[in-house]
Image: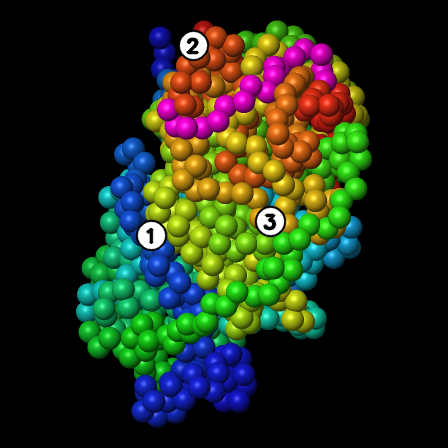
Amino acid sequence: MDREAAIKRSNLSEAELQLIEKYLGRSPTVEEIGMFGALWSEHCGYKNTKPLIKKLPTKGKHLLQGPGENAGVIKVGEYAVAFKIESHNHPSAVEPYQGAATGVGGILRDVFAMGARPIAVLDSLRFGKVDSPRTRYLASGVIKGISDYGNRVGIPTVGGEVVFEDSYEENPLVNVMCVGIAKPEHIIKAVAKGEGNLLFYYGSKTGRDGLGGATFASAELSSEGEDQRPSVQVGDAFTEKLILEATLELIEKNLVIGIQDMGAAGLTSSSVEMAARGKSGIEIDIDKVPARASNMTAYEFLLSESQERMLACIEPSKLPEVEKIMQKWELDYAVIGKVTSTERVVVYEKGKVVADIPIRYLVDDVPTYIREVKKPSYLDEVRSLPSLHLPHDMTPLLKDLLKHPSIASKRWVYKRYDHMVQTNLLAEPMEAGGAMLRLKGTTIGLAMSTDGNGRYTYLDPYVGGMQAVAEATRNISCMGAEPYGITNCLNFGNPEKSHVYYQIAKAMEGMGKACEVLEVPVTGGNASLYNETDGEAILPTLIVGVVGAIEDYKKAVFSPFKAPGHTIYLLGKPREGLGGSMALKLLTGKIAGECPFLDIEEEKRLQKCIRELIAKELVISCQDVSDGGLAVALSECALMGGVGVRVETEGDISPEAFFFGESQSRLVISTLPQYEDTIKNICEHYDIPLTRLGTTTSDNTIHLTYGKRTISLSVQEARELYMTEYL
Amino acid sequence: MKTVKFGVVVFPGTNCDRDTSWVIQSVCKSEVRYVWHTETDISDLDVVILAGGFSYGDYLRSGAIAHYSPVMKAVKEHADRGKLVLGICNGFQILVESHLLKGAFLHNKTQHFLCQKQYLKVATTDSPFTMKYARDEVIQIPIAHGEGNYYLPQADLDEALTYDLIAFQYCDKQGVVNEETNPNGSTASIAGILNRQKNVLGMMPHPERSSEVEMGSTDGKKIFEGILQWIQSV
């Protein structure tokens, strides 16, 4: 690699290069340029988002490990639960199968590197136009990639989202969350410390694949994206399964000081970040790194993103036992360096120093960019609602919503994932807004969900940021679980553009506010910026992953109506407006109007209220009102349960807002008639409006009357529409 | 009563070993140990279970590499002595590759991996594994596989029918067995099949995933109960 090419690949600006020269007091070597480029990228260095991240609330009563490690950790009963979400958007845009597969691989490693056994994966996916060939190509590749990788490793994919919106046409989103469990004493950190201790490499050999992935992921794509395929890594789920078992065995036998996976920026980021956490220095002998290809250079070894590789820090005396475990799992391994006290990273190639950098420059002194937060003009332009011609009979609109691939059942996706392996999942993925898993040997149910809404965040970034937290936590409260912590993935366009930076800053502010009010700490996150192609950015998409728990999983409730003769209530206040809704999008093709109403204090009361109702076993089923509004929520409960529903009510908002509006903080519950008074009292206590909507029936019809308007279709027809398979 | 000892074989890439031993230990209250694929002496075991997963990644034909593992020689000897062997999913594929059972596996007819709740018809009760069911009983045990399309040549199918070797067939809720209710294209909708001596069963559905109320079905538990009862009555 010549110097010019290294600079070009590094994505470092002229000013940043000058800063590096100033820090080092000399001009950097080719290897050093590569290392700075990787660690100063947004992906590793958060140079655009760090000042915003600092404002997020990171303390909570259930928290064991906050941001800064491979994953966040919360305490649930006698267990430590590690979880994190990460994006693999750019790789999936150019090579969907491998991009998505390695996305799963990377986040699994983040979790088991902490000592936790992965028990669940959830993925939030975004694709473009429903009818475009590119969407079909990307969706089938991404889903097959997740399926082939997750199934092989034996980690169930238990939930997530699949949403189609035009803006993701060129830039699909693949955000993967992994949740793992451990005994608290087995949680370890990604640290290298203790002078003379060894840097121990294990897993796959290093090849040239994925070279420069971190910098690639931190730049805009061009329509010549095909050329960037070599930047995409290739996954091997079988090796992943082996390093998973070997890693957990190393940690269980107390043989390691710290472990980190070689993810983005490979050996460079893992070694440097581990040393930084230990306030140590490291020496790496690059010729010791197991190589897949011949004649690889130090630059390539340092920046390769070959998959399924781990770096551990171990004491020399433990080496024989560590080697025995590697041999048992038939893994490649090598001692590639050692810990020093110099607080520098020094890299040797054939006995010659090719890089020598004080670690703080790479990790602590990442230039950060604080930009002006200026309200963009588009926000006012999109507020006016386009003219609407609503038909008198809204039944066809409900039918269109039920079969829309963003709303319809995702069974076609999750039946390709082994969602049952490990035998912990307590309800099929479509039967609840989130997933509920038992913790074997306890009564505890572990609840999790991933949510986010690009339409809302586009219309009002602050409310959209709050809403992502509100919906994710609501989805687990609806099952009776209390949210313990969140992780997040920021998917935005180019932060150097003023309107994009505004979206990022405001969405994060909203997320922080919601976390503060709902008392759920942020335990970590990931930023994927520059999701643009030829200057067109995606909808601002903040995805929130949440984990929580219920003490007795036998009390958990799910969405489907269970039997005829139950009373149906709406908890929460119906509000006027179709702004930002799926109905509006279907009717006009536009994302416009006021962002759906959300009062985060009201949300908090609602979630407390429903958790108390479920804890007191007063609720038979519960479903939140989200995309598609109340009519869709009621239909889903009916068609999943195979039970009819008859709603007769009236009110002072318009029928379209009642049926299809998406104002937040609303739930549909079914219950026994005799619980009415108790439920009323509890809702009054939390100041949550309660509306009796109707009853479940045995006539196999969804019959919804609001004032003089009626929507009516058979449960069978609704089910058929809802089960429409996109692929 | 005789204690029955189970062994669950672990190949690199096996991933249902823990689920299977959980059911044996915590649900059936029986003794179980893991058997590493390099072991050659398994004479302490009464029952060997080859659990589900992706042995050696199954990048080649499923089970094709696992059958060369040292433990498979011991498993054959175990079966030759008339002891019980149960192969679940990938375990079934390994039994076929090892010629402990006849036939071969193809990709599912949809070409996609398929994980779903599945109805099965119990085709025979004349085996240790199926003795606790009623003949033609419709049960629910989930499937999760990409290469579950079991192919059996006509002569072997005739033999299976003659000697009542078909254990389970895919069906719908009403017990209808036909092409429409066949999720993967298997010959004669076969979901599970026995060897001639009926001491070896291979099945694609996962009984360990339907042995507890929490999992939505307890129909799979009867397989383990049948095994226990049979060994204890011998």
| Whether marks 2 and 1 lie on the same chain | no
From the top left corner, tell me how far across and down residue A258 is, in percent: 29, 58
Q: Residue furthest bottom?
A: A26
- Indicate the position of residue A499 as horizontal and vertical percent values: 56, 67
Q: Disc 2 vs disc 1: Cβ atoms closer than 8 Å?
A: no
Give the residue pinned by disc 2. B232
Q: Nearer the viewer, residue A612 or A152?
A: A612
Q: Residue furthest front?
A: A652
Residue B91: quarter of image: top right
User: Up-down: is B167 above or below A655?
Assistant: above
User: Label 1 is placed on what type of residue?
Assistant: Pro
Residues at circles 1 and 3 in contact by the CB criterion of under 8 Å: no
Q: Chain of mark 1?
A: A
Q: Nearer the viewer, mark 2 or mark 1?
A: 1
In front of the other: A97 or A532? A532
Q: Residues within 10 Å of mark 1 (few under 14, many from 20)?
A: some
- Residue type at the position of mark 3: Glu
Where, by quadrant of the figure, is residue A344 drawn? bottom left
Quarter assignment of residue A260: bottom left
Residue found at x 65% / y 60%: A381
Q: At 71% across and 12% down in the image, what residue appears?
A: A699
Which SS class for mark 2?
helix
Element under disc 1 = loop
Tell me if residue A297 can be seen: no
Magenta span: A685-701
The local crowd at label 2, few if under 14, some if 14 to 19, many if 20 or more residues have their Cα within 10 Å, is few
Residue sitting at x 50%, y 89%: A3
The residue identified by callout 1 is A57
Query: Residue A594, which numbered label?
Result: 3
Q: Position of residue A452 (x, y in %)?
A: 54, 48
Does A405 appear above or below A541? above
